[in-house]
Image (spheres, helix red, strand yellow):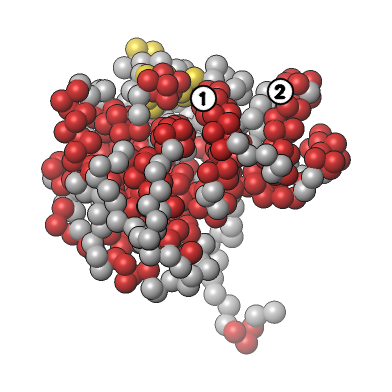
């Protein structure tokens, strides 16, 4: 709603009036769409002060440490809900009643299998390929297997594609892992929950089916919930930008996976374990803490603080509790890396340097520890992030397509050569 207006005065030009839009919560937003008529546009590298879209899905207040999905605090969803219920919420706008949830869970379970020919698709990849490289390829390839519902202008097709992606991502992620290990790929089981099924496909083999620990399944489900959506981050914006061109949903999600792969985004929890390897031993912590405090040293402590959350990461509180439960369940002792992580956590929560700068352990710090404890290799961390985030990506894709939208076309501040004429080759110096 535009109740107020801002006035931009550009020297030598008439004032430009810009509407001020007010959302449900959060700061007011200046609508600069009309600025182009004056021959100007804004310059905002990294889109730090630019709203690229209107959305009703997720709200973040980084200063207060608030994360809401459709209005519900992430802490409540993690404690009182489960991942598929959260998926329903993100996709549909409201939490399901008992009948709606049962129907949604049943529908997802009926789509967990993938086309049998996809198995042969994996043979085109090297066994030692990074799992994210394989994930980008196989998810993008889904459009070649499920081309019966790719009309993005058909709401029913969009719904079918959304459910297929949510249902098949755990199967594909587990297939990526099994392929890298040289183990038989496991079919999904519809008698298990979403998280249980993923752990079953990851760690069981045809010759040995082990029961799934409820504690580990709960931890996995919480990791999925806490990574389900995070507003207009790099990968979500990428999915929206790809979708604005009319690309099919599988291609859009593959684009999101590619963006997520970057170490500054989805690779953060993998970077935590890499950092722990670099530190090596508890005896080296003081040296590396000093390096982290030195402005002239490029070393950074990964998994502490957050670009968006300036106070605390609300997901980290829940994840720390889950981390304690997992380590208690597994009874892991004498693991140098986990011992090192716990010592770093202790320092970050007590050292004035970290407290004053709000450099608290974030969700990536704890999720990395949990995934390692469960037995998931570091190279798979970002794949699991992609699995969890798919529902957020597809929710934003659906939201964008459900109303009027324009193809994304950012502007630029050109600083190259002005127009010039070609000089004959013989005359060039």
Residue where numbered disc 1 is placed = 318
Residue placed at 85% from the left, 36% from the top? 286
Q: Quadrant of the C terminus?
A: bottom right
Q: Quadrant of the N terminus?
A: top left
Instruction: Give whichever of 352, 235 is nearer the camera.
Output: 352
Residue 64 visible in rendering = yes
Indicate whether 418 appears above or below 297: below
Marks 2 and 1, the one that precedes in the sequence: 1
169 left or right of 325?
A: left
Instruction: Give whichever of 74, 103 is nearer the camera.
Output: 103
Indicate whether 308 appears above or below 335: above
Q: Quadrant of residue 94?
A: top left
Q: Residues within 10 Å of mark 2 (few under 14, many from 20)?
A: some
Indicate whether 351 appears above or below 335: above
Q: Position of residue 131 (x, y in %)?
A: 48, 59
Q: Secondary structure at mark 2?
A: helix
Q: Residues within 10 Å of mark 1 (few under 14, many from 20)?
A: many
The disc label shown at residue 395, or none: none
Residue where numbered disc 2 is placed = 349
């Amino acid at each position: 709603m535009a109740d107020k207006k801002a006035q931009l005065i550009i020297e030598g030009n008439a004032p430009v009036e810009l509407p001020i839009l007010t959302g449900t919560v959060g700061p007011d937003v200046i609508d600069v769409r009309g600025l182009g008529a004056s021959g100007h546009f804004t310059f905002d590298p990294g889109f730090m002060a630019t709203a690229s879209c209107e959305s009703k899905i997720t709200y973040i207040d980084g200063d207060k440490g608030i994360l809401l999905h459709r209005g519900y605090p992430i802490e409540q969803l993690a404690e009182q809900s489960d991942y598929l219920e959260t998926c329903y919420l993100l996709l549909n706008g409201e939490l399901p009643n008992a009948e709606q949830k049962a129907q949604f869970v049943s529908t997802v379970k009926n789509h967990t299998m993938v086309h049998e020919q996809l198995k042969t698709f994996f043979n085109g990849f090297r066994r030692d390929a990074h799992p994210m490289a394989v994930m980008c390829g196989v998810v993008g390839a889904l459009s070649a297997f499920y081309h019966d519902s790719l009309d993005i202008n058909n709401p029913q097709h969009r719904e079918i594609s959304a459910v297929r992606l949510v249902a098949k991502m755990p199967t594909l992620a587990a297939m990526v892992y099994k392929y890298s290990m040289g183990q038989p790929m496991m079919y999904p089981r519809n008698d298990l929950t979403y998280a249980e099924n993923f752990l079953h496909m990851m760690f069981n083999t045809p010759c040995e089916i082990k029961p799934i620990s409820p504690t580990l399944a709960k931890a996995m489900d919480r990791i999925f919930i806490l990574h389900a959506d995070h507003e207009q981050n790099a990968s979500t914006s990428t999915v929206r930008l790809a979708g604005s061109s009319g690309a099919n949903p599988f291609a859009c999600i593959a684009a999101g996976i590619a963006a997520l792969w970057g170490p500054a985004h989805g690779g953060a929890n993998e970077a935590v374990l890499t950092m722990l390897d670099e530190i090596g031993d508890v005896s080296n912590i003081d040296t590396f803490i000093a390096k982290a405090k030195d402005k002239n040293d490029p070393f950074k402590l990964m998994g502490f603080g957050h670009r968006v959350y300036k106070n605390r990461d609300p997901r980290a509180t829940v994840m720390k509790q889950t981390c304690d439960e997992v380590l208690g369940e597994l009874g892991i002792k004498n693991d140098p890396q986990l011992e090192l992580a716990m010592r770093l956590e202790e320092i970050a929560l007590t050292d004035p340097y970290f407290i004053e700068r709000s450099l608290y352990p974030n969700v990536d710090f704890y999720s990395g520890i949990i995934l390692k404890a469960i037995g998931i290799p570091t190279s798979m961390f970002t794949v699991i992030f992609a699995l969890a985030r798919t529902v957020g990506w597809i929710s934003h894709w659906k939201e964008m397509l459900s109303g009027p939208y324009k193809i994304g076309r950012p502007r630029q501040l050109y600083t190259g050569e002005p127009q010039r004429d070609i000089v004959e080759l013989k005359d060039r110096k």
